[in-house]
């Protein structure tokens, strides 16, 4: 009777070096998996790692953008202060005068 396979599984002939085959077989035995399961798992992990690296690179790029935006905002918030520091304050101020005690103007009654 022929072996039954899932319709989405394809059988592939693969050539490996003896050393690689030995290492894969040893790891499969250690993890209590078949050699086929070990190879499929490792191939899938490779694609997952590539996807994770792409996400990580995108996150780093976003972080760099946020940091640049923050630096720009800080720079803009300090710009007016820098401008005021370079502008001298006017020295022509009049002293405040206080009304004399006991005298109430007619308008204030």
Image: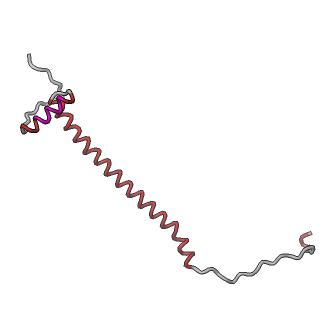
- Left or right of 35: which side holds 107? right
List x then y, in percent, for residue 49. Answer: 26, 43
Q: Which residues are magenta?
A: 22-29
Q: Nearer the viewer, residue 16 or 78?
A: 16
Q: Residue at x 54, y 71 (%)?
A: 80
Q: Nearer the viewer, residue 7 or 58?
A: 58
Whether 28 is among the magenta residues is: yes
Q: Decide if residue 97 is on the left or right side of residue 87.
A: right
Name the residue located 86 percent from the left edge and 76 percent from the top edge.
99
| Residue under the image location 67 percent in, 83 percent down | 91
Q: Position of residue 104 (x, y in %)?
A: 92, 73
49 on left or right of 60: left
Of the 4 image quadrants, the one containing the N terminus is: top left
Q: Residue 9 at what x, y percent from top left?
A: 16, 29
Q: Residue 7, position in %: x, y? A: 17, 26
Residue at 51%, 70% in the rendered image = 79
**Farthest-out residue, top:** 1
Of helix, strand and loop, which mostly describes the magenta segment?
helix
Occupied quadrant, residue 25: top left
Q: Quadrant of residue 87?
A: bottom right
Q: Is residue 56 magenta?
A: no
Colour mapping used in the image: secondary structure
């Amino acid at each position: 009777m022929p072996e039954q396979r899932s319709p989405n599984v394809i059988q592939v002939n693969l050539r490996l070096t003896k050393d690689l085959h030995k290492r894969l077989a040893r790891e499969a035995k250690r993890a209590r998996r078949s050699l086929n399961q070990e190879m499929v798992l490792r191939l899938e992990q490779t694609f997952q790692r590539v996807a994770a690296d792409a996400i990580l690179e995108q996150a780093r790029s976003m972080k760099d953008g946020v940091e640049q935006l923050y630096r720009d905002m800080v720079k803009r918030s300090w710009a007016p202060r820098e401008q005021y520091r370079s502008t001298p304050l006017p020295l022509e101020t009049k002293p405040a005068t206080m009304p004399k005690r006991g005298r109430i103007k007619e308008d204030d009654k």
